Image (cartoon, helix red, strand yellow):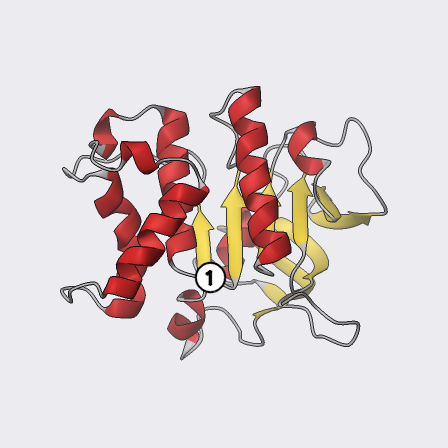
Amino acid sequence: MGASGTAQPLISARDLYAGYGKKPVLKKCSLTVEAGSLTGFCGPNGAGKSTFLKLCLGMLRPQQGSITVMGARPGQAGFREILLRIGYVPQNTQGGTLPATVREAVAMGRYGKAGLGRRLSPQDKLLVEAAMEAVGITTLAKQQVQKLSGGQTQRVAIARALAMEPEILMLDEPTSNLDWESRMELLRVIKSQQEYQGLTTVLVSHSADTLSECGAIYRFTAGSAEKLAEYQEGLHA
């Protein structure tokens, strides 16, 4: 369900400093992501958009300031349970070298909850099929992931994330390998999940088409994030 007026934000950062080594990428960065929202992150390369996602996932620790995701601090004890409720699709997803069909790759999204080595239940399998259908890759189900195009591989990665039944979906440049028609179709899928399933979605993009569909937009620049009142041309730069 979407957020009510009194709901706490699912993601909250305050005066956040973070980076790699001693040099911070984010400097006094504060932002919130409301439950049920489609929130876009834009700004130049190196401004901290992907870094912020890594902080949300506990892959990187803050140097100063605070960040909470679903009320918990990433990386702390018990956060693994939170991670099972987050679907994450990084930049430049690749097919990899393991021999796996599209259906098998999407099914990996269920093993976090079912447990590695366990057989998937009939319900798990239905969720896998639904995720493939949602992103339009049902006809590719038996193909090897290694042989897919970049755009098709991106769809597989998104389907795998959706198969998790996440409460938060984080997408880092999800439409970068797609042509205009495919990009619009994938945006339709993302918006339908956000609007009808109440899926909180954070979407990093340089695409004007993509950003214009977001309800809230943060522009990252000079280490901080500015919330914009509305989408404006040129923000994708």
The answer to whether any part of residue 40 appears in the image is: yes
Q: Residue furthest right?
A: 229
Say if 174 sits above or below 197 in the image: above
Q: Say what amino acid the circle numbered 1 marks.
A: Pro
Say if 209 sits above or below 199 in the image: above
61, 124: nearer the viewer: 124
User: Who's the residue at 53% across and 73% down the image?
Assistant: 73
**The C terminus lies in quadrant:** top right
Say if 143 sits above or below 160 in the image: above
User: Who's the residue at 67% across and 57% down the image?
Assistant: 37
Q: Residue furthest bottom?
A: 77
**Residue 1 at what x, y percent from top left?**
62, 67
Q: Residues within 10 Å of mark 1 (few under 14, many from 20)?
A: many
44, 155: nearer the viewer: 155
**Residue 191 at what x, y percent from top left?**
61, 46
Q: For this view, does 68 lie left or right of residue 103?
A: right
- The quarter of the picture where residue 119 lies is bottom left
The answer to whether any part of residue 19 appears in the image is: no
Say if 110 sits above or below 76 in the image: above
- The quarter of the picture where residue 203 lies is top right
User: Who's the residue at 61% across and 36% down the image?
Assistant: 205
Read off the residue under disc 1: 166
**Residue 164 at what x, y percent from top left?**
38, 59
Q: For this view, does 190 lie left or right of residue 104?
A: right
User: Who's the residue at 70% across and 74% down the image?
Assistant: 8
**Residue 153 at what x, y percent from top left?**
35, 33
Secondary structure at numbered mark 1: loop
Q: Number of labelled discs?
A: 1
